[in-house]
Image: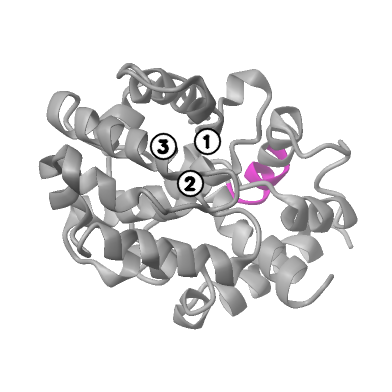
Amino acid sequence: MNKSELKDFLEEKVIQYNNFDFIESDPIQIPHSFSLKEDIEIAGFLSATIAWGNRKMIINNSKKLMEIMGNSPYDFVMNHSEDNLGYLDNFVHRTFNSLDAKTFMKALQNIYKNHNGLEAVFSKNQEENSMQKSIHEFKKVFFEIEHLQRTQKHVSDPLNNSAAKRLNMFLRWMVRNDNKVDFGIWNTISTSKLSCPLDVHSGNVARKLGLLKRKQNDGKALAELDLSLRKLDKNDPVKYDFALFGLGVFEGF
């Protein structure tokens, strides 16, 4: 496939997967059950945080977490007492346990009370063509409260060569705005700065299509993939996530 054929092929796949049917089987359905901006942000952030492993299990555990928060995530974050945090005692998703969940609630409260919310923190350190420094700085703010060292591993740092798949996915959800799957409720960040959520599926498909050479799915691979996708569409490179993910997960490409 030459560049123009590849672009046409991927554009077709974006249209195929970037639609409301996609929501049914994806963790993005969790924030889609809310309408308040802060509820969408917090539900999205927490669901994205535990989005690794079996998708059904991710969705079920995300729903469980929302139920523990009384299906009012923003209210819970802002007004929880120590007793309320006790409701999280039995929560676990793989290595993300109740201690991590409690720290996340306190960290989110700090962000909304003292830093004007998630959007303000993420939009602060953006660079011309990248959100990776911004994610790095976000992690510092997130963990400025007292926390266990173990919880830090649940927020990736791109400057440590992580692909930061889950945070890049969360940013895609919040920033892309085409009235389909993604929310587009953050207008302080341009879609041109977003990076593709790189995982085993999108990585394998990208390699087969010649968009990526590096074998590991790490920060360096992400930079390489970003470059390839920006050549196809510099304004909205991350829409191709739908194509790469759909081809990998639904078509076994």
* Marks 2,1: beta carbons within 8 A: yes
* Residue at the (60%, 67%) spot, across then down: 55
Query: Is residue 151 shown left or right of residue 84?
Result: right
Q: Position of residue 164 (x, y in %)?
A: 59, 36
Q: Position of residue 88 (x, y in %)?
A: 33, 50
Q: Give the residues in magenta.
A: 227-233
Q: Is residue 58 visible?
A: yes
**Which residue in the protein does label 1 denote?**
154
Quadrant in which residue 44 is drawn: bottom left
* Residue at the (41%, 70%) spot, across then down: 29
Residue 171: mark: none
**Secondary structure character of the magenta stretch overall:** helix
Q: CA distance from mark 2 to mark 3?
A: 14 Å
Query: Is residue 185 shown left or right of residue 230?
Result: left
Q: Secondary structure at mark 3?
A: helix
Give the amino acid type for the residue marked by disc 2 in the picture: Thr
Q: Secondary structure at mark 2?
A: helix
Q: Quadrant of the N terminus?
A: bottom right
Mark 2 vs mark 1: which is more N-terminal?
A: 2
Give the amino acid type for the residue marked by disc 3 in the picture: Leu
**Which residue in the protein does label 2 denote?**
49
Mark 2 vs mark 3: which is more N-terminal?
A: 2
* Marks 3,1: beta carbons within 8 A: no
Q: Does 6 sit above or below residue 197?
A: below
